[in-house]
Image (cartoon, rainbow, N blue to C red):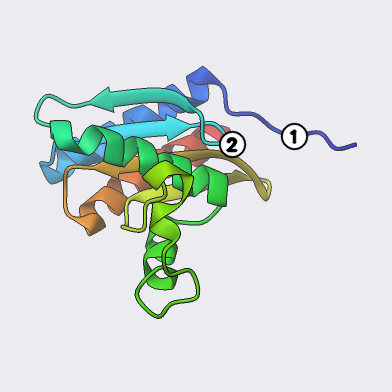
Amino acid sequence: MRTVQKLTLDDARIMMAGAEAKATEIGVDMDIAITDDNGSLLLFQRMDGGRITSIDVAISKAFTAAAARKSTRDYGVAGAAGGPAFGIHVSNQGRFMIVPGGLPVFVDEQIVAGIGCSSGTPNQDEVVAQAGIDALMSHLG
């Protein structure tokens, strides 16, 4: 048997604060979702100007990153036409995202969460997600 680390709601709040601060810094109101290690939603926030159409996208990016243990950017490459995972975007009732902005969160090589951001460009979404991870890692020391 092994011991697994779990993300707490307080941990998710730290990630959310870091992601929101970065979104504010770059001037893009985001939809930000944080899931636990199996992709179940823990925390969601839509900033005042976050797109309503991006709510499901952010949640699905976080789900994909956690459940697949890989960034959604990586799946965008593998899931492209002719790629080894072509068609994966229709799996899990269409929740599997293949655009940047979803990142898995590892602590001591164990998956503990997924974070997904949407409303900016794919690169902006990913930068904001990474800021959330960086905030958690800084807090953990």
The residue lying furthest to the bottom in this view is: 82
Q: Secondary structure at mark 2?
A: loop
- In contact (CB < 8 Å): disc 2 and disc 1: yes
Q: Looking at the image, can residue 49 be seen?
A: yes
Residue 48 location in percent, x, y?
11, 24
Kind of element beneath mark 1:
loop
Residue 25 percent location from the top left of the image: 17, 41
**Number of residues whose C-alpha sits closer than 10 Å to that of mark 1, classed few (under 14), some (14–19) or many (20 or more):** few
Give the residue drawn at x 38%, y 46%.
Answer: 94
Q: Quadrant of residue 133?
A: top left
Residue 134, visible in the rendered structure? no
108 or 4: nearer the viewer: 4
Residue shown at 55% from the left, 51% from the top: 68
Q: In percent of the image, x 28 and y 41: which residue is there?
A: 57
- The quarter in which the C terminus is drawn is top right
Residue 76 position by quadrant: bottom left
| Total marks placed | 2
Q: Amino acid at mark 1?
A: Val
Question: What residue sits right under mark 1 in the picture?
Answer: 4
Disc 2 versus disc 1: nearer the observer: 2
Residue at the limit of the structure toward the right, as seen here: 1
Quarter placement of the N terminus = top right
Q: Amino acid at mark 2?
A: Asp
- Residue situated furthest top in the rendering: 10
Q: Which mark is residue 37?
A: 2
Identify the residue at image location x=31%, y=52%: 126
